[in-house]
Image: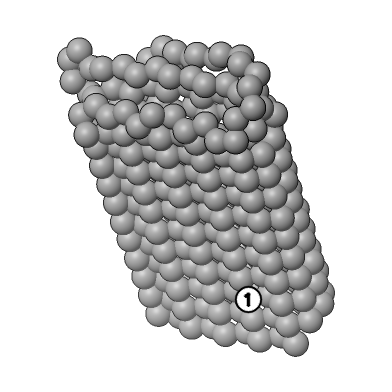
Amino acid sequence: MERRMFIFVLLAVFASLALTPAPLWAAGGSSFSVAQSGENLAYSLKQDDGEAGGRLALSSLTVSGQRVEIYQEGKQLQASVSQTGENLSAAIEQYGSRNQATVEQSGQELSAAVFQQGDGLRASLSQTGQGHWAEINQQGSRLAASISQTGQNNQAAISQTGEGHDALIQQNGSGNRADIQQSGANGRAEISQNGSDNLAEIISQGSANQAFINQEGLANQAFINQGAWAGLAGNNYASILQQGNYNLASISQMGAFNTATIQQYGNANFASIVQRGSHNQAYVVQR
């Protein structure tokens, strides 16, 4: 999609301000809000109500290294950013109608981005600590995504296309990486990581799939892949639980109405489940 020219305003004002909220502004039922505290703050805003002669709002306040960019085009869009700390970056870009995006950052060296295109989309991103990176990308209708990060140097991404999906990533610790990709309709995917250097990935294609990964410990790896087989795709359930260190688990489900669960307790376990077709069931426990 060809984007309109992005207008950026940056003012440098060195002042002692504890909190600098931007005034709420609305057009066509859309609104945004920005709250920043610190030094060398900047935000850039563009909003279009989607009609001929659409209105534009620009506002910037500056009082180390915080940056906010918000671009909205459509109807009844809501965007909110709150920042406290140093060297923070947040971007929200929304097209369509009835979308909502929220970013909250507290700490140092944090980066967050939300892109949404469609109708009835919800995105929430919360970062506390240092060195986190997170991104949410949604295109479709009735999609919901949430990322929460605490600790340091965690990375998370959610990408969803279709309708009715729900995705959640929670990270607590350091050096964790998580990725969720969903396409189709009415899927649910969740990743929870507590510890350090864990890796988790969920790729789900089809309708009404469910996938869950829960990791506690050090350097665990978990992968779930759900897709089509002989024209069948959907209603699969996959779950991986890892408690310990250096565990590896993978589940591959191609088809429909399959169920697979892996539970690993301890260290250096390996498990893999592969399902093709429909109505298969598998359960693995390692201690």
Residue 115 on image: x %, y %: 44, 36
Q: Is residue 163 left or right of residue 29?
A: right
Pick whichever, 27 or 131, lies toward us.
27
Question: x, y percentage for residue 261?
Answer: 56, 79
The amino acid type, in three-letter code, at marker 1 is Leu
Visible residue check, residue 237: yes
Is 26 above or below relative to 193?
Answer: above
Q: Quadrant of residue 242?
A: bottom right
Quarter that holds the C terminus: bottom right
Vertical arrangement, residue 74 with respect to residue 277, above or below: above
Q: Nearer the viewer, residue 217 or 246?
A: 217
* Dot 1 alpha-carbon crowd within 10 angstroms: few under 14, some 14 to 19, many 20 or more: some
- What's the residue at 60%, 49% (across, down)? 127
Q: Residue at x 35, y 43 (%)?
A: 100
Q: Quadrant of the N terminus?
A: top left
How many numbered tags mark residues here?
1
Q: Position of residue 173 (x, y in %)?
A: 73, 60
Q: Position of residue 270 (x, y in %)?
A: 74, 74
**Point 73% across, 82% down: residue:** 265
Q: What kind of element bears circle 1?
A: strand
State the residue lying farthest toward the front.
16
Instruction: Answer left or right for 256 relative to 202.
Output: left
Q: Residue at x 66, y 86 (%)?
A: 285
Q: Label 1 belongs to which residue?
A: 241
